[in-house]
Image (cartoon, rainbow, N blue to C red):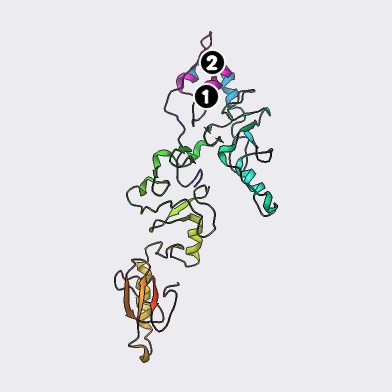
Amino acid sequence: MEEALGNHSVAIQHNKMETPKNTNGKLNALEIASSCLQQSNAECVQTEEVRDNVDTTAMERLDKGFMEYGCSHYWRRCRIRAQCCNEIFDCRHCHNEAKNNIDVERKLRHDLPRHEVQQVICSLCGTEQEVRQVCINCGVCMGKYFCETCKLYDDDTSKEQYHCNGCGICRIGGREKFFHCYTCGCCYSILLKNSHPCVEGAMHHDCPVCFEYLFESRNDVSVLPCGHTIHKNCLKEMQEHLQYACPLCSKSVCDMSKVWEMLDVEIAAIPMPESYNNKKVWILCNDCGVTSQVQFHVVAQKCLNCKSYNTRQTRGETSTASSFSR
């Protein structure tokens, strides 16, 4: 969940800004720009006190082009120059999509890390400059949300962006709705603060289905009951194909009690041939981890400890990888 995953990156809205005034007691455009720029990881907005003192022209200059420029990833009023290839792109994701795909010769493929962005180009006046929130030439605010650390600009603040110091990157969803788990190494919903199972570096690996790096993914990520993580859409696709076990540890990804009840009925309705009456096998339960010896059945083997059918046969005359594949 880069700039996703229910994270947060907070624009500093509640701290009042220093309001430099000129000799006439009003703010000019450059002073507004300077005041706005001083707000690290902040929205380019002023308090009511400031707005009362700012002339209309200066405010219009800051807001000019708002939500009119950008790409498929962000609404923003600047483009970036990629130092790695000295080309201009709307954002680093646009660069990565263009420079790291199967149409590019393998040895030339590369990504642009967020922290390596050094130069931006104002979309309104075309001035190239070092990373900053307000254009040094025309005075336009190039991104209502701006993070100097991540070099992130975005005019669409409805995402509730915030910078997480623990993650070291910006997230979306609102700081008050998320917390950073230092064991898992990522931001999770506040609802999981005292209930999620911690897995060391849970977010610092690829999605087990699509193999996209989860820590920087812009798509929603789900935390499974076992603590492993997976893209929300990938999990949904798994369930659509009747796969309900974690791809990493094979534990059930949801409450399967109703399915186990249905299997009880099915097994009762399918008696085994007499020659199998005394056949027993050893199984390992994927859900609780208990090993037990049970009566063999061609449909599935039930764990004696937790009553789950998510088991695998470990010893017996007939060897199978898993007794539950529905």
In the picture, measured across the screen, residue 41 lies left or right of residue 254, that is: right
Q: Quadrant of the C terminus?
A: bottom left
Residue lying farthest front? Answer: 107
- Location of residue 39 in the rendering, given as x and y in whole percent from the top left corner: 49, 26
Q: Which residue is mark 1?
A: 36
Closer to us: 42 or 86: 86
Question: Can you tell which of label 1 and label 2 is closer to the viewer?
Answer: 1
User: Where is 5 relative to 276, above or below?
Assistant: above
Inspect this view and state whether residue 77 appears.
no
The reply to whether callout 1 and callout 2 are in contact (CB within 8 Å) is: no
Residue at 44% x, 54% y is 222
- Disc number placed over residue 27 in the picture, else none: 2
Image spot of residue 297 (x, y percent)? 38, 82
Amino acid identity at mark 1: Cys
Q: Which SS type dominates the magenta stretch?
A: loop
Q: Nearer the viewer, residue 310 or 55?
A: 310
Single out the residue that lies furthest toward the left: 305
